[in-house]
């Protein structure tokens, strides 16, 4: 009788114990993630007002869109982030490079990606100052920390888009880079070479040849951050492109059935992501499975559709809504599942 046959029950027991320990470890890790990424509690209108008006003032309630029970609107923002030494290049750690609204129709399973440019010029509530929209998060953070930053950003984007922002998720550059590397990189196809020289002169610029390209985390980060090669609108299109590529990589290659990969992804989320989402894993999985990812509507707000460019009093490049009202933008986003939009223009606009 071989050693294997003599000890097969011991081996089976060890495998079961390891499986139980692995499940227990992942469960603990998942709980750590939930505890670590959660921005506790919603910020009320009154709390935001008090944070900005500590010396008094007349409270005026913000007019925000009503919550749609059949629709889920998630604001995804990307930034350099705090305490990220490899990407810490000076001021602006909390300025938002990526501003992406992910909208899901719970009834039909339709999904939409809507990109807003960071140079959109808005009047900030409570302060009543004109600012670029990519400054909103950092103003809120400097005023009252993470909770105020989330509340203020959601309020501003609800006003700009015309839809109620249910959840917000922020991720920093290092987290995005790690996530791409963890899933084994991303594939993109380019009709022509992609060249960015001005933005990364110290590392010799960034170049990709035409054809199929396999991007590691650093290359993917350069690709979505580059803005001098074409325009900020094209950057938004590239951000949507890589987000869909990442979603396809995660769902199509069985990564979520690999315990090691799941553990690594949980670690990334716990270290680099913050959200005020009501995290319900079973409900989230059910909703994700319901979405028809083959018919995602994509919209980039640009000077080709709803915006025009001008200069601020300080000479800065800014974008304003055509007609100086957000009505057309509201109509487009509210009714986006009944519309179709052409790809964003790749035309260059001076910065």
Image: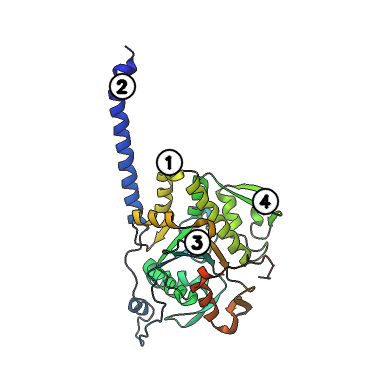
Residue at mark 2 to residue at mark 3: CA–CA distance: 51 Å
Residue position marked by numbered label 2 in the rendering: 8
The scheme the figure's colours follow is: rainbow
Horizontal and vertical percent position of residue 266: 40, 49
Q: Is residue 320 left or right of residue 258?
A: right
Horizontal and vertical percent position of residue 291: 46, 58
Q: Is residue 134 left or right of residue 31?
A: right
**Placement of 45 over or under 254, stated as above or below:** below
Residue depicted at 58% across the width and 52% down the height: 220
Q: Count neighbours of disc 4 (C-alpha within 10 A) and say few if under 14, some if 14 to 19, many if 20 or more.
A: some
Q: Earlier in the sequence, mark 2 or mark 1?
A: 2
Q: Which of marks 2 and 3 is nearer the N terminus?
A: 2
The quadrant the N terminus occupies is top left
As helix, strand or loop, the secondary structure at mark 3 comes to strand
- State the residue in front, 316 or 207: 207
Residue position marked by numbered label 4 in the rendering: 208
Q: In this view, does 76 lie to the left or right of 226?
A: left
Q: Earlier in the sequence, mark 4 or mark 2?
A: 2
- Give the number of the disc on residue 258: 1
């Amino acid at each position: 009788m071989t050693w294997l046959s003599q000890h097969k029950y011991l081996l089976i027991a060890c495998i079961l114990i390891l499986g139980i320990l692995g499940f227990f470890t992942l469960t603990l890790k998942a709980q750590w993630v939930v505890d670590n990424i959660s921005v506790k509690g919603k910020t009320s209108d009154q709390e935001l007002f008090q944070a900005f008006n500590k010396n008094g003032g007349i409270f005026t309630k913000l007019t925000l869109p009503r919550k749609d029970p059949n629709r889920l609107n998630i604001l995804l923002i990307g930034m350099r982030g705090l305490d990220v030494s490899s990407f810490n290049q000076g001021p602006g750690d909390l300025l938002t490079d990526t501003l992406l609204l992910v909208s899901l129709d719970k009834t039909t399973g339709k999904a939409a990606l809507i990109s807003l440019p960071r140079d959109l010029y808005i009047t900030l509530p409570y302060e009543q100052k004109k600012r670029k929209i990519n400054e909103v998060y950092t103003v809120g953070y400097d005023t009252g920390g993470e909770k105020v930053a989330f509340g203020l950003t959601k309020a501003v984007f609800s006003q700009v888009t015309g839809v109620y922002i249910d959840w917000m998720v922020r991720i920093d550059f290092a987290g995005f880079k790690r996530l791409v590397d963890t899933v084994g990189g991303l594939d993109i196809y380019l009709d022509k070479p992609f060249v960015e020289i001005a933005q990364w002169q110290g590392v010799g610029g960034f170049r990709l040849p035409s054809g199929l390209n396999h991007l590691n985390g650093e290359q993917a980060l350069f690709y979505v951050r580059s803005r001098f090669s074409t325009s900020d609108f094209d950057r938004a299109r590239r951000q949507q492109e890589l987000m869909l590529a990442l979603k396809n990589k995660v769902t199509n290659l069985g990564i979520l059935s690999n315990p090691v990969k799941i553990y690594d992804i949980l670690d990334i989320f716990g270290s680099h992501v913050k959200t005020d989402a009501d995290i319900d894993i079973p409900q989230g999985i059910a909703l994700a499975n319901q979405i028809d990812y083959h018919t995602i509507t994509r919209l980039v707000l640009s000077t080709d559709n709803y915006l025009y460019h001008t200069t601020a009093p300080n000479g800065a490049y800014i974008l304003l809504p055509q007609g100086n009202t957000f009505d057309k933008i509201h109509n487009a986003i509210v009714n986006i599942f009944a519309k179709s939009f052409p790809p964003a223009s790749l035309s260059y606009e001076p910065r």
